[in-house]
Image: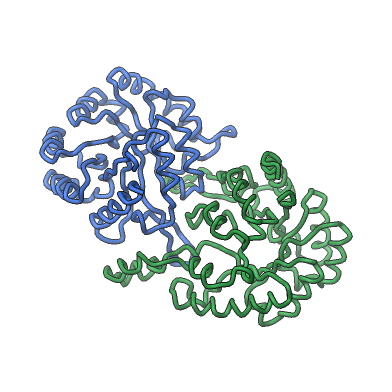
Amino acid sequence: MSKLIPAIQLYTLREYIQTPEGLELCFKRIKEMGCDVVQLSRVGSMIPADFITDLTKEYEMEICVTHSPLERILNDLPKLIEEHKSWGCNSIGLGNPTRWYLDDGYEGYCRFIKDLEPVIKELKANGMTFAYHSHTFEFVKYHGKYMYDFLIEETDPETFHFIQDSFWMKWGGINHIKYIKKVKNRMEVMHVKDYTTRLDHFHFVEGITGTIGEGNIYYPPILDACEETGVKYLAIEQDRCLRDPFECLEDALVALKQLIQN
Amino acid sequence: MEDLKIAAQLFSFRSYCRNSKDVLETLSRIREMGYDGVEIEGVDKIIDANSLAQHLKKIGLKVCSTRSRLSRVELDFTGMVEEARLFDCQNVGIGTIPADYAFNNPQGWQQYIEYINTVAKRFSAKGLRATYSVEAHEFIKFSDCGLRAVYTFDEQQFKKDAAGSYGFDSIVDGTESEKLFFELDTFWLAKAGVSPADIIRQLVGRIKVIRFRDQRIAESSYDFFYPVKEDCEVGKGVFDFASLFPVLKESGVEWISIGQNYFTRDPFESMSTSLKQIQIIKDGYKI
């Protein structure tokens, strides 16, 4: 039996977590589903950090990582660190670099890595980590090498960590297991969802984000690789739900727990 | 397994196959690049099979498979058998499931499978292997037929169907393993989101030709979440071909067919690069 812990990535419920009441309701429902860990992402910016702290205590909810806005990571770090500490979370995550960097291709990434250096240093001093969430666009080649490999090699392995995503790796046709192994001990949280296919309006096959257990990703070897490389949490995420997102998450959680047990 | 050979997909050179002279010249150039064979497709109306076969023999290029649409079976069965005899090639492609079988519902698949079983039997009687081309629509769950899910969404039905199976399962289970064979294509398998190695393992002995196509991730100027996935030389893109070789070794595959649908430079140059890339990987596995 594996030690991987299922978590819920709140991005899936982004429409429900813009108010304090909504966030509380989500915590309650996630708890009822049988899940004790969440990732904060897209939480309404008007919700006070203290309120979230209280919620985590009241519902005994663990926060494994967050997706924080890049502007805050760069310009409001001390406060962000303080908030994370009050939530008992020691990893500040980034959903994706902004277009301020991405539009400049290779130069943009170099600037991104450079701009983050003081952040990484500060986090290191606080015993925390930074977590970069990847999609597919990091697999553009510059100077004969994937940007993702630059990110792995040009950053501090101790503090610059990664959040990979099973769907986006699949979407690009990338060998996910190989990349899980490349970030050994540098990924505590991985995003999991399924790759479901359907015919689009022009009868082409398209891959869309789906509920775990309903799509085409074969998970056992992926989970084995996760365990070998020190992944702790599998955060269930589904960008686009074709039915009630809570039901999607609930079904995915049941399926994921089964996968973990086997 | 020492004889895992490499072929070029003639479809990749379709713009260099406009007339019979072009076809012959293109084939010669494919041979010069160092390919062992070729996948013949779409030239039956351009050049007669006899002179094609003669030329192939002269230049020493083998045929790994012929590919036709399913409709040709009814229109020109003898022609297909004759081609196979002339080209000394047992693998006769019969395409993928046509859209008129409404491939997103189980009934359509059942009808198709019944028909294709008779087709496979006819070829089998001639000593040939009818070969189905696997694309991506085989891996759509019957529940996910797009339009219905969006417009006439029925939650109860969705839950019932979500547990359902793929067209792929029905065709693998519903046909005879010695009569119907499969041709895989790495590009389509990636599109479907399945792991090629798993599919190859499911079809041990039933794949004689596997097509290698690659894709690279390119910058998109308008939406970085959906970068462009474009065709590129095999081995230059994101697919991990090296990881397939250990599986290929056990699966009974005889041919790797290299293909690329769209080119950003001279197709002959690109296909030559692809061949070299795959040879390097293949030599690494000593098969």
* Residue at image coords 44%, 52%: A218
Q: Is residue A103 left or right of residue A40?
A: right
Q: Which chain is blue?
A: A
**Residue B175 found in image quarter:** bottom right
Q: Which chain is green?
A: B
Q: How is the image coloured?
A: by chain
Q: In the current view of this chain or complex, which residue is farthest to the bottom?
A: B74
Q: Is residue B255 above or below residue B71?
A: above
* Residue at image coords 27%, 53%: A249
On the question of residue B94 being in view, the answer is yes
* Residue at image coords 43%, 53%: A217
* Residue at image coords 73%, 67%: B90
Q: Is residue A61 left or right of residue B278?
A: left
Q: In the current view of this chain or complex, which residue is farthest to the front?
A: A1
The quadrant of the picture occupied by the N terminus of chain A is top left
Q: Along the line of sight, which residue is nearer the eye, A169 or A253?
A: A253
The location of residue B2, given as percent across then percent down, is 73, 49
Tag count: 0
The location of residue B221, given as percent across then percent down, is 48, 45
Q: Along the line of sight, which residue is nearer the eye, B50 or A212?
A: A212
Q: Is residue B264 above or below residue A228?
A: below
**Residue A243 found in image quarter:** bottom left
The location of residue A66, given as percent across then percent down, is 27, 36
Q: In the current view of this chain or complex, which residue is farthest to the top?
A: A125
On the question of residue A98 being in view, the answer is no
Q: Is residue B164 left or right of residue B251?
A: left
The location of residue A136, given as percent across then percent down, is 46, 43
